[in-house]
Amino acid sequence: MGISLPHILIFAVVAILLLGGGRFSSMMGDVAKGVKQFKKGMAEEDEEKPKPAARLQAQPPVDPNPSAELQPMKDDRPQV
């Protein structure tokens, strides 16, 4: 047993009768202003993206075999 559409409509009519039409609409206007402010704040947060870090200075490529006496290992896997 949950809240259905007729229950919500009855509740809305009772709220309008108790609070008055003008007061109820001003409350809804305040809610709308709050939503606008929230969206504006989220948009401003997106605009303030952090700047990318400075790049490192280019370095010369590394020589893969700096010593002439170093040689690659021999392949000792069995030949098929």
Image: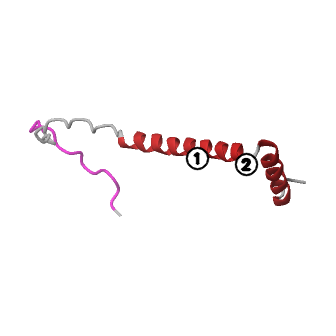
Where, by quadrant of the figure, is residue 54 drawn?
top left
Q: Magenta segment: does it hold 72?
A: yes
Q: Judge left or right: residue 35 versus residue 65.
A: right
Tag 1: amino acid: Ala
Real-space CA distance between mark 2 and mark 1, rounded to the nearest whole angstrom: 17 Å
For the C terminus, the quadrant is: bottom left
Range drawn in magenta: 66-79
Q: Which residue is mark 1?
A: 32
Which label is found at residue 15?
Answer: none
- How many residues crowd around disc 2 within 10 Å: few (fewer than 14), some, or many (20 or more)? few
Q: Nearer the viewer, mark 2 or mark 1?
A: 2
Tag 2: amino acid: Gly
SS of the residue under disc 1: helix
The structure residue drawn at horizontal position 85% and vertical position 59%, both measured from the top left corner, is: 6
Q: Judge left or right: residue 64 versus residue 50.
A: left
Residues under numbered marks 2 and 1 in contact, where contact means CB atoms less than 8 Å apart: no
Using the image as rendered, state which of residue 39 and residue 32 is in the foreground: 32
Q: Judge left or right: residue 59 versus residue 39.
A: left
Earlier along the polypeptide chain: callout 2 or callout 1?
Answer: 2
Magenta: predominant secondary structure element?
A: loop
Q: Which residue is mark 2?
A: 21
